[in-house]
Amino acid sequence: MTPKLLIEFVQDVYQTKDFIPLHAPSFTSKEEDYVLETIRSSFVSSVGQFVNQFEQRIEQYTSSPRAIATVNGTAALHTALYMSGIRQGDLVLTQALTFVATCNAIHQLGAAPIFIDVSPISLGICPNATRRFLEEHAEICHQGCRLKSTGQMIKALLPMHTFGHPCQIDELLLVCQEWQLTLIEDAAESLGSLYKGKHTGTFGRFGALSFNGNKIITTGGGGMVLCADTQDGEHTKHVTTTAKVPHPFEFYHDELGFNYRLPNINAALGCAQIERLDQLIEAKRKLAKQYAQLFSRSPYQFIVEPDYAHSNYWLNAILCPDVSARNTLLEETNSQGVMTRPIWQLMHTLPMYSDALRGDLSYSEHIEAHLVNIPSSPIL
């Protein structure tokens, strides 16, 4: 396997020698029809039938008791953390191998991340590494889980389902039970992914989805909070609509709230997109199978779903033999108009998180040095 062979394969699969993006949205006339309907109705902001419809469709698809639409995935995650009681000075266990929004949502509440290594099984936070960190650095007190060195409370565990591959949820739930932690899932990349037959984002108290333009379905910008409890869901909806108490004309807000509601025009796009979600997942899984065959006899390792999972294969990824091979692949593919990308720089290497507590991150560092994402747009 050489970069040239990968370039030729991708160009053949997508039937073009023009620029091939990493992940492009897919639209039909239905999206245009629904968006035009919102424009003609004049309900293009946060009031309109499509917002409620989109929430209901996500509830049905994920089997979540309640789903609350937000302006983007970061807002959904920020809301989930806030609703879980994360506040100034608290600590949240998460992975250093993630998109920066995961950590930004924690920081926006005045809390701080603790970085834990990821698992070779899922590329999500490792249950064994999480337990090791807690056994060494934490203790249970009458208030919950406390960091021994500072007395700060460790409130939550926040795994991210990397590239749509579900984390080892059962093991993580056991850690949460043993250490009195709230599980909050960053499922931004994993709409349509299943862990042992159950949708990601529905195992913790809250989960967060993203509908950014590069996700498996898009609303342009948008997110969703999945709530395990309907009462939590109603409270979440209240908080994301500036905590305004319903009244014919008075403006009264009874608690701190956020202006996070998804506009109706974006929800219209989402309603059309979700009608095709199963088709998109099927196409992406077919593409992943083709990639797996391509790399099966090469020094490049294609990242496959864990045995327990049914992944949406949001972004396909390979592990290169070494850093030099990774860099060569990145340079040659991008120079030929085939978009590839390295994984995100580890969070503790960024200036704003360089002082964060962390465990051993050996496998995360290995992944950062070897992984490349390759074109993943569904072929329909």
Image (spheres, grey):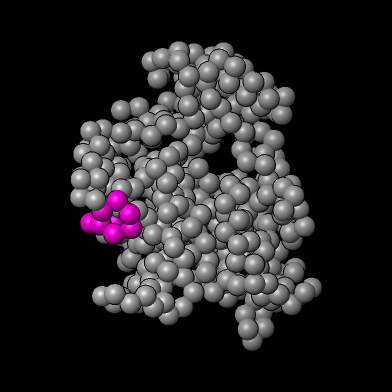
Q: Is residue 51 above or below residue 98?
A: below
Q: Position of residue 305 (x, y in %)?
A: 47, 42
Residue 283, percent across and down?
Answer: 34, 32
Q: Is residue 51 above or below residue 299?
A: below
The reply to whether the magenta stretch includes residue 302 is no
Query: Magenta region: which residues?
Result: 43-51
For residue 280, above or below residue 191: above
125 left or right, relative to 202: right
Asked whether 48 falls inside the magenta stretch, the response is yes
Q: Quadrant of residue 212?
A: top left
Tell me, yes or no, if residue 131 can be seen here: no
Q: Residue at x 41, y 14 (%)?
A: 16
* SS assignment for the magenta stretch, majority: loop
The x and y percentages for residue 194 are 39, 51
Provide residue 307's location: percent of width, then percent of height.
Answer: 46, 46
**Image quadrant occupied by the N terminus:** top right
- The answer, for residue 258, to whether it is visible in the render is yes
The residue furthest front is 249
Q: Residue at x 46, y 46 (%)?
A: 189
Task: Left or right? Give the position of 17 relative to 36.
Answer: right
Image quadrant holding the C terminus, namely: top left
* Figure check: 294 above or below 313: above
Residue 71 or residue 62, whichever sits in front = 71
Residue farthest along the bottom direction in this orientation: 142
User: Is residue 249 or residue 122 the one in the foreground?
Assistant: 249
Q: Quadrant of residue 181?
A: bottom right
